[in-house]
Image (spheres, rainbow, N blue to C red):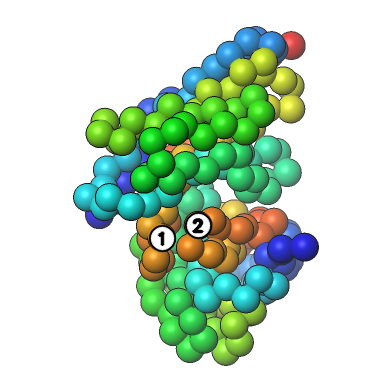
Amino acid sequence: EAQVTQNPRYLITVTGKKLTVTCSQNMNHEYMSWYRQDPGLGLRQIYYSMNVEVTDKGDVPEGYKVSRKEKRNFPLILESPSPNQTSLYFCASRSDTEAFFGQGTRLTVV
Amino acid sequence: AQTVTQSQPEMSVQEAETVTLSCTYDTSESNYYLFWYKQPPSRQMILVIRQEAYKQQNATENRFSVNFQKAAKSFSLKISDSQLGDTAMYFCAFMKPVGNQFYFGTGTSLTVIP
């Protein structure tokens, strides 16, 4: 079954404590990306990757890092989370015709 | 740059009735894909329907259909025989075939009233 798996689904953390949200896909897609969803703003792209070791900034990259050491994995790293990063996060991988989304991660930074 | 606009933040419809959600987009591309995604309270992003820009025929999936007007850059979603399970946030999205470009509208919250 085609799947994008991200973990954890829920995370509450404190300001400044580094965290990683994992993302894995089983479709051998080259393209992967991270989005954050905020009320009234829709989904905005944080970072994307066009292949292994190829990553680039999206529309809202400040405060985030990513890595793409393997084709299937694309973790999102918050080195020093702040309350304005409280949001719903989605990982996605895409073919030429469709995007597949993970289940979402609800992050709260207090 | 591409933009996607959903001008209806909230809508409601009576069960079994028909509702249309609006979406407009802006692009200079000739080849692209348009999507409607449904996001129920579970937060999962579920693909409802997809339209390829070079196909003139409007896409249909059971009770869901689109009205794709390429020249007007309009892509509305019609839900027929609305069901309680259709209550969700709906996002319109634009995607180019190659590259990272995938753009979302701000969403329309649809409530189906019993």
- Give the residue drawn at x 54%, y 64%: A94
Amino acid type, callout 1: Pro
Q: Horizontally, is A57 left or right of B37 in the view?
A: left
- Quadrant where the N terminus of chain A sits is bottom right
Q: How far is the residue under mark 1 from the one under mark 2?
A: 6 Å
Amino acid type, callout 2: Thr
User: Quarter-wise, where is residue B1 in the image?
Assistant: bottom left
Q: Disc 1 vs disc 2: Cβ atoms closer than 8 Å?
A: yes
On screen, residue B37 above or below B67 = below
- Quadrant where the C terminus of chain A sits is bottom right
On screen, residue A52 above or below A103 = below
Q: Position of residue A37 (x, y in %)?
A: 52, 51
Circle 2: element type:
loop
Chain letter behind tag 2: A
Q: Nearer the viewer, residue A88 or B62?
A: B62
- Give the residue drawn at x 55%, y 58%: A99
Q: Horizontally, is A62 left or right of A35 in the view?
A: left
Q: Disc number at residue A97? A: 2
Mark 1 residue crowding within 10 angstroms, few (<14) / some (14–19) / many (20+): some
Confirm whether residue B44 shows in the render.
yes
Q: Which residue is mark 1?
A: B97
- Give the residue drawn at x 51%, y 34%: B59
Q: Disc number at residue B20? A: none
Chain letter behind tag 1: B
